[in-house]
Image: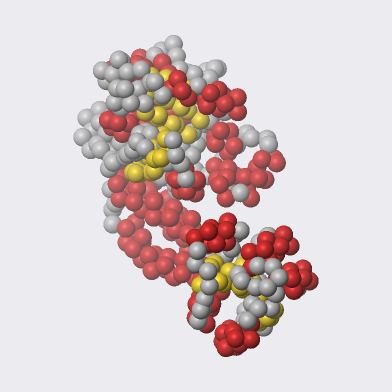
Amino acid sequence: MALAKILWVDDEIESLQSQRLFLETKGYDVHALTNGFDAIDYVKDNLVDVVLLDETMPGITGLETLAKIKEVNQSLPVVLITKNETENLMDDAIGSQISDYLIKPVNPNQVLLSLKKIIDNKRLVAEKTTTAYQQQFRNLFMALNSNPDYNEWMDIYKKLVYWELEMQKSDSPEMQEVLQSQKSEANTEFFKFVSRNYASWVSPKSKDGPIMSHNVFRFKILPHVEKGTPLFFVLIDNLRFDQWKTIQSTFAESFRITEEDTFYSILPTATQYARNAIFSGMLPVDIEKSFTAQWKNDDEQGGKNLHEEEFFRAQLKRLGKSDLKVSYTKVLNNQAGLDLVNNMHNLLTNDLNVIVYNFVDMLSHARTEMEVLKEICLKHSLYLFADEAYREFCYTGTQFSALQLSDVDENVAVEPMRHGKRGGHVSSSPARPARRGPRAVSGKPASRRFAIADGVHDGCFRTRPES
């Protein structure tokens, strides 16, 4: 059985007989035609895997043939072969969604390589991914069993996330099962690690520990605040590190991501605790003491995150930054998002703008009743996490039973495009010691922040729809 069916269209096809025979010896079935009209008709009536198309032919040109072929089968890969190296032709060809571009004279190996890239790409990537993970398995195993500290756990988690995303390219269920087993082992070991160390991290006398929710603003964001320069601190609630890596390329189309960093959430990691800790710069027990009227316990009625702006302004005052011009915006629905866009020109006059997005939490919350939306989320790679988010607990991305340290929270600063050019900068840095932390309580993973222009990217694993 042939590896693939190739349609080669060239008005000088007889001179390409040696290339055609070469491809056939490599297992390809090659059908030859001499003009675009016949090629269009052939594609209509026959299954073809790839078209090799000459650009200069009598009758209709290769580009005209390409357009007609795409009308018949939009997804059919087409390789344009031409003597013409002009930039305009290349632009037209690429704009017409060609899969590859070869310059005459072509040798057989050039054509073979192009076909392999198109036809065998998925298989070759899957094989390479599987092999690469097999080679890295031992390194990860050794890292898990070398008594890692909190920074090394961050690194282990990032590697596991990397391989989890990479293994989506693999067609080996066996290796995917091995990866899941390794993640399970990481969950167990991380649970033990947190159990041993969390109390010391949150102790007022602690001199060593990861940056956590209640001091992430002081250490990660405040250093980038400059009077007269607008900075946007965007918190995306319920967004995990693996989800961020999935959509990172989309952000990269508009922003330059110059640094990426992580921090640990306090426990519990639910929004009521973790997000209030971020904005107040305090542990929940201290928030309750300082803001008795505003704080709501689990058994009390009312929104649990309704006073974030008040908490945030109080933190700025404690840090000696009450002179900053600050705004706080919470986006809970589409209209709020439109209002934010319409008000952007005013926000640019501020020193610091806080924007909280709840839409990811709404997508993934366990109480979501929107079945159609769930179905879309399951099928779309950018929203693959929506179903997982209300079924999984994770430490910095992995699962453990009783005590849970959030999704390792990741700080990312990015810069917006200005008038078609990239500007500003972004930042994060290695975790610095946290001096205090909350009491250890069972909870669900927390936040990761994402900042525009200089800020931080946050995604809290679980929150209330509210707030």
User: Residue drawn at (50%, 81%), measured in percent from left and top?
Assistant: 107
Residue in the picture at 71% in, 70% down: 59
Indicate left or right for 261 with 389 as reference.
left
In this view of the protein, can residue 450 be seen by the observer? no
Front residue of 465/17: it is 17
Q: How is the image coloured?
A: secondary structure
Between 419 and 263, the residue placed more toward the observer is 419
* Image spot of residue 454 (x, y percent): 35, 34
Q: Position of residue 88 (x, y in %)?
A: 53, 59
Tag count in the figure?
0
Residue at position x 41%, y 12% from top? 292
Q: Quadrant of residue 259?
A: top left
The residue that appears at 37% across and 24% down in the rendered structure is: 352
Tell me if residue 60 comes above or below residue 164 in the rendering: below
Q: Residue furthest right?
A: 45
Q: Residue furthest top?
A: 293
- In the rendering, at what x and y percent does residue 65 appear? 68, 66
Does residue 247 appear in the picture of this structure? Answer: yes
**Residue 171 lies in quadrant:** bottom right
Residue 89 in the image, given as x and y percentages of width and height: 55, 62
Which is more toward the observer, 359 or 361? 359
Which quadrant is the N terminus positioned in? bottom right
- Is 39 or 15 nearer to us in this picture? 15
